[in-house]
Image (spheres, coloured by chain):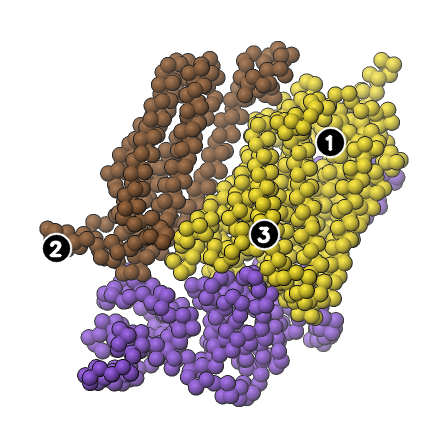
Amino acid sequence: MSATTIVSLPDQATAQMPKRSYLNNEHGLLSWLLTADHKRIGMLYLLSITFFFFIGGAFAGLIRLELLTPQPDLVASDTYNKFFTMHGIVMIFLFLVPSVPATLGNFLLPIMIGAKDLAFPKINLLSWYLYMAGGIFTLASLVLGGVDTGWTFTTPLSTHYLNTHVLTTATAIFIAGFSSIFTGLNFIVTIHRMRAPGMTWFRMPLFCWSQYAASLLMVLGTPVLAIAIVLLALERLFGIGVFDPAKGGDPLLFQHLFWFYSHPAVYIMILPGMGVISEVISTFTRKRVFGYTAVAFSSVAIALFGFFVWAHHMFIMGVSNYSALVFSLLTMLVAVPSAIKIFNWAFTMQKGSITFETPMLYAFGFIGLFTIGGLTGIFLGSLGMDVHLTETYFVVAHFHFVMVGGMLMAFLAGIHFWWPKLTGRMYPESLSKLAAVVTFIGFNLTFLPQFVVGYLGMPRRYHAYPAEYQVLNVLSTAGATILGVGYMLPILYLGWSLKYGAIAGNNPWQATGLEWQIQSPPLTENFLETPIITHEAYDYEWLEEKMKLEKQEVTHVG
Amino acid sequence: MGISPVLWQFLVNWLHSSALFPTEASTIAPYTDALYFFLIGMTIFGVVLVGALVTVFSLKYRREKHPVAVQIEGSTLLEATWTIIPLAIFLVTFVWGALLYFRIYNPPANSMNIYVVGKQWMWKAEHPGGQHEINALHIPIGQPVQLTMISQDVFHSFSIPDFRVKREVIPGRYTTVWFQATQTGKFHIFCTQYCGTLHSGMIGEVTAMTPADYQKWLSESTSGMSLAQNGERLFASLGCIQCHSGNAASRGPNLAGVYGSKLTLTNGQQVTVNDAYLRDAILNPSEHVTAGFSPIMPTYQGQVSEDGLIDLVEYIKNMQSNYRVHQTLMTSDSDKAAPTTPTTGTTQER
Amino acid sequence: MPREHAVHDEHDEHHSLPQLRHHFETEEQQREAGSFGMWLFLLTEIMFFGGMFMAYLLYRNWYYPAFAAASNQLNVPLGAINTAILITSGFFMALGVWAAEVRKKSTLVLMLVLTAVFGLAFLGVKSDEYYEKYEKHHIPGNSFNISEFVNPPINAKTGKPTEEPLMPDMAQKTQVFFFLYFAMTGMHAFHMIIGLFLLVWLIWRAQRGDFTSGYVAPIENFGLYWHFVDIVWLFLFPLLYLINRHPFK
């Protein structure tokens, strides 16, 4: 059913499932749990983050359901607080941070640069186990009764005033943090040391650049979160006053340490998504990405600037006026590389030959929503505006536009785009187009009203709210329902396609990446022989030549 | 703004009636809203521009119309354009936002001061005259009001959306915010920083009244003792009066008129005496020893509540002479000379 | 770890050495990747300790007298001895790397054992110091006692207090110092303990001859780690023990 909508797929009609692939190389559960194959680990991650995505999503649903009415009528206040805490923790630490890097990155990064595996396969497996351990601690804190600090763990609330499972959750985040440190470390070493002959830095696909930039942030930022969490746990355990003003500590120090990680974490979440979008747009316009170098460097620039803007989360907390000025200015600067990317993507389409498969639709969704998300970030980076908007639903809407409208759209674009490579089968095209459109509509209906209700002044994390905000909240809840449907659909049809999907063939999209030149699903060792790269990334003329040669070979043999 | 006032009014009214837009009830609000509309304009412009590019290219260069892609490397000129123009817009926003920020957080000199204490899960406002209110705040319109705020426990955040002001309320240090209401009415107070179980219950109401009504309200709700009077009582009962007597030979510095002056500390630091300094000097005296005095003052950490500290600060703030200090000292000295009576709690406490 | 992949390596003729993992092209690539990874890991460690250094600098600035007084309570001779022990340990580690490179098995084992012995000695001295803090009630928490800072002991000869007495509110802040002292040295000691476990494993493998046939990467990388731990101490020692000690006039 899918083949009809995809144009000119020469090798798909005759495509066959390869006899041997990484999927059937070894059998049994144990061969998966002890695997060192980056592709299998990527699939393990895909399964586990999907599981946690739906847990986090369930909490989001409950939150929206409670906010349907102004009265606190569905659950008690402390339960509601646990809902949004768990929603935040699960979505950020167990879904968004690992989403693209740990699944698609793990699977594709080595193939894209022509390597057989990541530099440290066992550390890669270890990082999945650490992720799962973090996930189990999170589930444990959930089962034991939950935690209600909010994902930001503000001291002294989290250290002296709450009697919930803060330590269990802190342990979870600490462990999951090491998982992302190891993933980032692995990626950086792999990109530096494992590139195939001829694969220079500027021949790498932009996906690799964005993974590289995100990895830098993981490696440098996450340890600071780890130490902040350790100090918080010690303070809570032993009643010591590092962050407690009554004992001479400074509660703002925690905020500084926390945001020193958690702001760059935003870029950990979005940069890999930008990499996906570059690949998708290039492929479906059959055209080189406009201004490759600018897009590559803008990823690195975002990563670098990203480290120097953390205090913009604290403009109203009494940081000095002058440091507020500096951080506001830097925030404005970090917005520029994102703007560059948006325009470069748009102009990639110019004089292309564009088709509109599902990944492309998700990518359009990304561009639209990320533009809104990015520009509303300017509101919050602007000092005086931030005073009124911070800690309201405006902020909630802003970061959901970036994280969900941006990253999740990119993630889904990537999953659909590489699904043929991951599994060897196509997803059903028309159903998935429907899902993309439903998601886009549902998303806007959910989060656009939140900008308005935020400017009206509705604070975030409110269990009950004044009645005049109800109309907008009802709209938002209605949107969330649609959004939920939009996210359920892919699970169903992707599951279906595992067995019944059309066989994809090596390169169903006629894309230029190295991953498309090998069989789908790939062999355990990826390449039969180490590729030697002689062309730039996104070189469609090279691909055309290659196709011609292959055709000739086939006719000769025939 | 280049918008004509009539059009502006129309826009504002239209938005009010459809409840998409909060009341403009303070002098700050129009400034904030102007920047907001500028930013909304920028966002719409950006989204429309990107949307138009994507749509036009999609239509013009779709596979059916344009079967073979033309490979383009990039264009330095174009890329420079969309680097510099956004940068310029963002810098304008930065300057505009910074100016607004300074306007919001720098109170005029003539503003009246009200103290606010935040605790789980209520706001307590204390007027200089001693009027206390819980989850409510009465203020006069047309008069700058500064709030000096502190939290007794966790982070809170004091927000009045209709005034477009907000400030974090932090344990252990004073923060301030100011506004000048322009219309009478009732407006929401929210705690916007998540502060525990009943976070969403930490709400209140500002009642903005005409100055005459405000005076009437003040006189009707007075408890009899002003903050400074409470402070004076604490000053005596905690024993502060013994060292800070204002006599030449006293062991502590003279506090009359000290508020607003510049002090040199023993470590050579120059400080201006403000509310925060006074509070901190009571709790952590050894970090704040005035030059020429020995570090003998005990700490009052844990002995005075935030309310009590506010009383003391307010008292010292308004202390112009040591006349009343001497009066009190003389009374208590004569008490001391007399046979011990249980009524002289002030001296016995020491 | 090399053995499990031997199966995949069979058909690849240029994989000459048994320790070459299947996904690397050459042994040099593997070695470079390993040491590059180690350097990156150490970078994350720097960020990890950096958070605590940040807190230390902030509070030292705020509570200077308390930090000076509390710092005077630390035992400088023991700290100095420990510094020497740790440097010696690092020296043996460096010799160990050399021994592995020149393929001298018994020397390598000896050097690793000496590294471990000196590492243990460091921890012994450290625990003695911790015990002293325990006896003096200088461990932050409920039993923390500030009386020594408020009323310093009187020197019998001069009849004056040995230290400048602190006011109680400032004396309370010594707890912040001791907390940071324990957090930083504790985290450092924790890294040493992990290192010792790794050392035992490396010694076991070294005496089996794993590292004296041209495959020195594990020894080299562990050496990097061990030297990093040394260097952290070389920052901690002056910061906690030495700076702003003020002999009481």
Q: Is residue B293 above or below residue C227?
A: below
Image location of residue A493, percent across then percent down: 80, 40
**Is tag 1's residue or tag 3's residue first in the polypeptide sequence?**
3
- Disc 2 or disc 3, which is closer to the eye? 3
Nearer to the camera, A449 or C180: C180
Indicate left or right for A486 with A52 as reference. right
Marking on residue A146: 3
Amino acid carrying label 1: it is Leu
Amino acid carrying label 2: it is Gly
Chain ID, mark 1: A
Image location of residue A299, percent across then percent down: 61, 41
Nearer to the camera, B259 or B121: B121
Chain ID, mark 2: C
Q: Which chain is in brown here?
A: C
Q: Secondary structure at mark 3?
A: loop
The residue lying at 66 percent from left, 44 percent from top is A52
Report which residue position mark 1 lands on. Answer: A422
Q: Tell me the CA gap for discs 1 and 2.
A: 82 Å
Q: Which chain is in purple here?
A: B
Q: Which chain is in yellow here?
A: A
